[in-house]
């Protein structure tokens, strides 16, 4: 009887032990087979990206110099024009009438000059006639002095007539210039922007909106800004004793267009403003890009990418990382056991994470199936080729 009781107690204890073990580790019998890669060292090039606004190298607002109605528009938006080429024609009827009146004034002034010149000539003849008579005491000196006074008065009237002629000529030239301003010409060679006024519109020099704009886009400027922290990091990382030397040492930059495509020309950062904008807390840079095919125009947007070298960088596939509570983790494999490891990422380039700290070259990490794992879980590692996991994803459209 005692023997049966002992066997029963042993069986109950064994069943309880197995039950407790299964409750503590329900997956103890399941060992996952997961792909694993080794962290490698490579020379990498990352990029700092900043949104840019693109402007023509020279942008001129075209305005009317006189008031008038537009009677003709000679160009269209987007057309390439040369400096001095006519763009608009304004009505100049009033100016033409004023010019006719001014021409008449010039004619009258010329006639007055001729009359005054004749009077001077006559007065001079009278003086010349009286001089020998006075010398021979035939007539008194009073008559000669009177003739000389008449000559001086005639010369003064001639000077006034000539001044009036010059004033009439200047008035006519001004009116003629206004007539010439009736043809609005391009100030520079470039591309015509939006045409804001058409035939029949009354325009003038005080209009806040220009007739159009002409942009020189053989080269374009790309403007972008850094915040104060980014700017200070830039100064620390670039070689050179001063800002000018540091700018010269910046490598050529890329331009990513608004559609995500990479512009086919490299650019160069030329200058940076000398102070932080107190309202935005940023400092502005300017890069220049060639645009011989005129693919870029005034007002385009995009992103400028400044290359940054990472020599002998430790890299892992970006898919091996995951985030929890603001920290980045990977599952590092040691003796077929995974360890939840915090890492610090310096940059991300083409589906690769450049690791600053947390793992080193040769460390094995899980690259897929992290959602099924917990810290210190046993796995069956399946070593896979690094590049087969980290290969950049190619767009399909």
Image (cartoon, grey):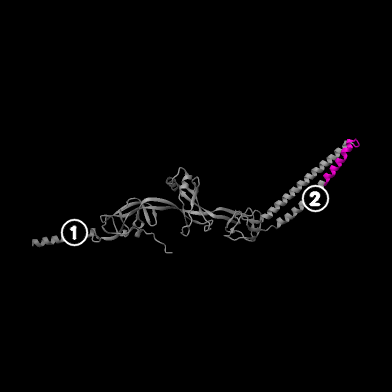
- Residue 130 on the magenta segment: yes
- Residue 230 on the magenta segment: no
Dividing the picture into quadrants, the one containing residue 98 is bottom right
User: Tag 2, which secondary structure?
Assistant: helix
- Where is residue 184? Give x, y as percent: 64, 56
Residue 363 appears left or right of 14: right
Q: Quadrant of the N terminus?
A: bottom left
For the residues labelled 1 and 2, the Cα–Cα distance comes to 134 Å
Give the answer, above or below, for where 239 lies relative to 397.
above
The residue carrying mark 1 is: 17
- Where is residue 27? Give x, y as percent: 25, 60
**Res 205 label:** none
Residue segment shown in magenta: 118-139
Magenta stretch: helix, strand or loop mostly:
helix
Residue 211 appears left or right of 132: left
Q: In terms of sequence position, does the residue under pointer 1 or pointer 2 come before the other?
A: 1
- Where is residue 245? Give x, y as percent: 47, 45
Q: Residue lying furthest right in this view?
A: 138
Q: Quadrant of the C terminus?
A: bottom left
Q: Residue lying furthest left in this view?
A: 1
Residue drawn 56% across and 52% down? Answer: 58
Depth check, mark 1 against mark 2: the one in front is 2
Q: Is residue 318 visible?
A: yes
Residue drawn 88% across and 39% down? Answer: 130
Classed neighbour count for the residue bearing mark 1: other residues with Cα under 10 Å, few (<14), some (14–19), many (≥20)? few
**Res 111 label:** 2
Classed neighbour count for the residue bearing mark 2: other residues with Cα under 10 Å, few (<14), some (14–19), many (≥20)? some
User: Tag 1, which secondary structure?
Assistant: helix
Dividing the picture into quadrants, the one containing residue 201 is bottom right
């Amino acid at each position: 009887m005692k023997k049966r009781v002992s066997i029963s107690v042993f069986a109950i204890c064994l069943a309880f032990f197995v039950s407790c073990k299964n409750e503590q580790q329900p997956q103890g019998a399941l060992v996952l087979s997961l792909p694993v890669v080794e962290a490698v060292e490579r020379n990498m090039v990352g990029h700092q990206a900043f949104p840019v606004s693109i402007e023509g190298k020279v942008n001129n607002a075209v305005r009317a110099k006189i008031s008038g109605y537009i009677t003709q528009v000679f160009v269209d938006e987007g057309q390439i024009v040369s400096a001095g080429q006519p763009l608009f024609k304004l009505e100049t009827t009033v100016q033409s009438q004023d010019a006719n009146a001014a021409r008449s004034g010039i004619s009258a002034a010329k006639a007055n000059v001729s009359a005054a010149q004749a009077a001077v000539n006559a007065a001079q003849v009278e003086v010349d006639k009286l001089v020998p008579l006075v010398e021979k005491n035939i007539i008194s000196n009073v008559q000669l002095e009177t003739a000389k006074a008449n000559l001086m008065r005639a010369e003064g009237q001639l000077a006034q007539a000539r001044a009036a002629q010059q004033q009439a000529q200047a008035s006519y030239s001004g009116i003629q210039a206004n007539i010439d301003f009736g043809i609005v010409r391009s100030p520079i060679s470039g591309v015509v922007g939006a045409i804001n006024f058409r035939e029949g519109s009354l325009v003038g020099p005080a209009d806040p909106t220009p007739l159009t704009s002409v942009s020189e886009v053989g080269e374009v400027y790309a403007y972008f800004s850094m915040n104060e922290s980014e700017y200070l990091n830039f100064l620390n990382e670039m070689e050179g004793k001063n800002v000018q030397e540091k700018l010269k040492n910046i490598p050529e930059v890329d331009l990513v267009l608004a559609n995500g495509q990479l512009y086919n020309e490299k650019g160069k950062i030329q200058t940076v403003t000398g102070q932080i904008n107190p309202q935005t807390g940023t400092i502005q840079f300017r890069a220049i890009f060639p645009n011989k095919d005129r693919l870029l125009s005034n007002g385009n947007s995009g992103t400028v990418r400044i290359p940054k070298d990472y020599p002998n960088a430790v890299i892992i596939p970006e898919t091996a990382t995951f985030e929890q509570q603001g920290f980045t983790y990977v599952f590092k494999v040691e003796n077929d056991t995974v360890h939840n490891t915090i890492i610090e990422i310096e940059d991300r380039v083409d589906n690769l994470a450049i690791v600053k700290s947390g793992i080193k070259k040769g460390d094995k990490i899980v690259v897929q199936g992290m959602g099924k794992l917990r810290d210190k879980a046993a796995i069956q590692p399946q070593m896979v080729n690094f590049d087969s996991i980290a290969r950049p994803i190619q767009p399909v459209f």
